[in-house]
Image (cartoon, helix red, strand yellow):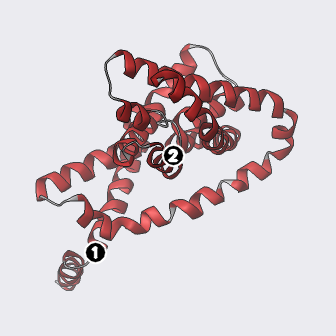
Amino acid sequence: MTLDFALGDIWVYLSTSPLLHLTLTVLAYVAGDWIFRRSGQKAFFNPVLLSIVMLVTLLSVTGTDYPTYFEGAQFVHFMLGPATVALAIPLYRHLRLIRQLWLPILASIVLGATVSVSSAVFMARWLGASQQTLISLAPKSVTAPVAMGITEKLGGLPSLTAALVVLTGVLGAVIGAGVLAVVRVRDDRARGLALGLNSHGIGTARAFQMSDVAGAFSALAMGLMALTSAFVLPFVLRWATG
């Protein structure tokens, strides 16, 4: 009886507070992670993917618009900064290994950024996409804050870019490891680099599930990809739309 009363009080408080959506976000991820672990960590049950599906379904059923949801869940957005900075810890642990491979890493990032941007832009152009859509699509493999900033400066739609970035990250986290296994890429350094380069933060989270080495190299690739894309994107877009 006391427990029911306490839970009732908590629900009444949350339902009238912006904390409701923060709480729902955390619970959705916890539920997604539980399903992921119960499945034997199968990539298809990626906790980020599952939590997105749960939250979108809940917001649609309750008729909650995104600004209302974000008002309560923006603390998660704020924590992206400290979480990204914290990636420096595994990088530092494997600094000696990274120093030994700096040239292959640099070459992979530059080539990967060029291919990633070019393939997406030229395929979309072939399908008849507008110039604004091409600009919004180009930074799909860059971490969201940087990608949206690049898109805004170049005249694209930041909201479309954000959706494409999340879609790319989730898709890479779900099928990336499987694709790498099919092509027989077994080195954790190479696997991490590929996931971070193509799937940014969500791919990096998946890489850490493989090993600490894969996670460190994925975090490095994510950061270098953001930096490299800022230089590569304008040239590729000028070439594609010129």
Q: Are marks 2 and 1 in contact (CB under 8 Å)?
A: no
Q: Is residue 22 visible?
A: no
Question: Residue 184, relative to residue 43: is it above or below?
Answer: above
Point out the tag, 2 or 1, that comes first from the N-terminus.
1
The CA span between labels 2 and 1 is: 30 Å
Question: Residue 190, relative to residue 143: is it above or below?
Answer: above
Q: Which mark is residue 72?
A: none
- SS category of the residue bearing label 1: loop
Q: Farthest residue in the front direction?
A: 242
Q: Residue at x 55, y 27 (%)?
A: 236
Q: Position of residue 38 (x, y in %)?
A: 39, 42
- Front-lying residue, 74 or 135: 135
Q: Residue at x 57, y 59 (%)?
A: 83
Q: Position of residue 210 (x, y in %)?
A: 60, 37
Q: Is residue 33 left or right of residue 233?
A: left
Residue position marked by numbered label 1 in the rendering? 18
- Please state, as top left, top right, bottom left or bottom right, where the N terminus lies in the image: bottom left
Q: Residue at x 37, y 15 (%)?
A: 126
Residue position marked by numbered label 2 in the rendering? 150
